[in-house]
Image (cartoon, rainbow, N blue to C red):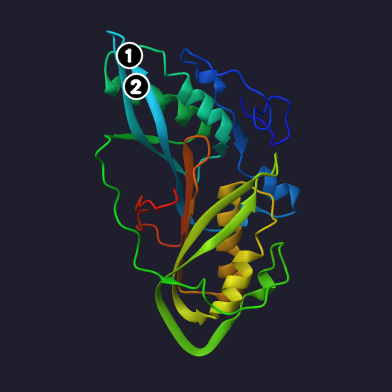
Amino acid sequence: MMGSVHSETNPLGKTSEYPEQYDAGLLFPIDRNESWKASGDDRSAITFYGVDIWNGYEVSWLTLSGKPVVCVAEFRVPSDSPFLVESKSFKLYLNSFNQTRFESESDVKAVMERDLSAAAGGAVTVAFHGMDYVYPAAPDALCIDDVDVDISSYTPSPELLKVVSDSQFDGWICSHLLKSNCPVTGQPDWGSVYIQYKGQEIDKASLLAYLVSLRQHQDFHEQCVERTFRDIQQRCAPESLTVYARYVRRGGLDINPFRTTEETFEALNFRLQRQ
């Protein structure tokens, strides 16, 4: 069932009972175009490739003998799927496995991939990692957080973005000052953003001021990244561009949207200390 951000059936912001038995009906899809339309924008006007990587840190089920299995799960939702999955419903869905018995790990994986693909309207992949799994390192990026800048706008301000004349750049930059707010509850969503681009250099102070301008913006993680991608692309016209946010976990899940101009550029699921 596809829902609206403010639908009465949206579990976000409501008191919920935590199910003890598997229930695929807990998943709550939301049209990716909804918040874009609400702001008068058109998501289809943005061209990108990408994926939303979710990491689940509280994933468990029972073997046929009743013994618990615990693991960390990695879910990859294609960005061209028509729906995103509301995060609280995702958490409730995962919790419904806790007291459910399965014959094998592969059975659990198959069930999750089936249910999540049906909810998203695209092919979702699932991978399980053991407790000794080591995440890959983050890209070697230039952090711009120490740049001296005066900031007065805390709502999205793409006009802040400026390029540097006669200067080129090819590499990664990052900021750990990313913050936006949940569009339903208003709760803060904290994160880091990694940007890889090639082309005319973007003025670092203007980029930092722009990223901070999202601080009071209410939107889903995925839309915040797409807005950033669009604004940089339109204002700075890089030859290639990737915007990748690593959000801090909430409720045992973190969401990491990845958007890029490069069809073959695969998102590396690294993990930062505060995640």
Percent of width and height locating residue 23: 50, 16
**Distance Cα–Cα, label 2 vs label 1:** 7 Å
- Amino acid at the residue labelled 1: Phe
- The dot on residue 102 is 1
Element type where label 1 sits in the image: loop
Which part of the image, by quadrant, shows the N terminus?
Answer: top right
Tell which of 222 and 63 is nearer to you.
63
Tell which of 224 and 34 is nearer to you.
224
Q: Earlier in the sequence, mark 2 or mark 1?
A: 1
Element type where label 2 sits in the image: helix
Percent of width and height locating residue 103: 28, 13
Horizontally, is 266 left or right of 116 in the view? left
Percent of width and height locating residue 36: 68, 50
Horizontally, is 75 left or right of 237 in the view? left
Image quadrant where residue 14 sits: top right
The residue depicted at 45 percent of the width and 31 percent of the height is: 117
The residue depicted at 30 percent of the width and 57 percent of the height is: 137
The residue depicted at 61 percent of the width and 74 percent of the height is: 235
* Residue 62 in the image: above or below residue 142: above
Tell which of 132 and 75 is nearer to you.
132
Tell which of 245 and 228 is nearer to you.
245
Q: Residue pushed farthest left?
A: 132
Q: Are marks 2 and 1 in contact (CB under 8 Å)?
A: yes
The residue carrying pointer 1 sits among few (fewer than 14), some (14 to 19) or many (20 or more) residues within 10 Å by Cα, namely some
- Amino acid at the residue labelled 2: Val
- The dot on residue 74 is none
Q: Is residue 225 visible?
A: yes
Percent of width and height locating residue 31: 62, 38
Q: Is residue 242 visible?
A: no
* Residue 257 in the image: above or below residue 130: below
Q: Residue pushed farthest bottom?
A: 166
Q: Which residue is mark 2?
A: 108
